[in-house]
Amino acid sequence: MVAGDSAGAGSRRQLALAEAHERAAADARAAAGRYGIAEVTENWFLQWSRSALDLLTQDA
């Protein structure tokens, strides 16, 4: 290998690794957002269903 080729190859590998990590981080942020939306939705539904149950059973 010619002098400098090894360093260049190492540099390209590190850049590729950094790009892969950036993609993984973006995917993780997107997943976190989806879980956050699911949390809000599930909490809303739980409150709604409890309120509905209270309304249905208050005269019983």
Image: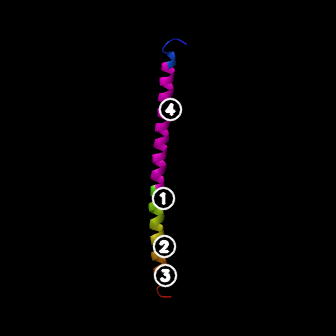
Residue sitting farthest toward the top: 2
Q: Which residue is mark 2?
A: 49
Is-magenta flag for residue 45? Answer: no
Label 4's element? helix
Label 1's element? helix
Q: Which residue is mark 3?
A: 56
Q: Which residue is mark 4?
A: 17
Label 3's element? helix
Q: Is residue 11 above or below residue 35?
A: above
Decide which of tag 3 and tag 2 comes sooner along the chain: 2
Q: Which amino acid, mark 1? A: Ala
Magenta span: 7-35
- Number of numbered discs: 4
Report, in whole angstroms, how far the alpha carbon at label 3 lies from the one at label 2: 10 Å
Q: Which circle marks residue 38 in the picture?
A: 1
Decide which of tag 4 and tag 3 comes sooner along the chain: 4
Q: Residues within 10 Å of mark 4 (few under 14, many from 20)?
A: few
Residue nearer the viewer, 13 or 58: 13
Q: Measuring 46% from the left and 85% from the top, which residue is drawn there?
A: 58
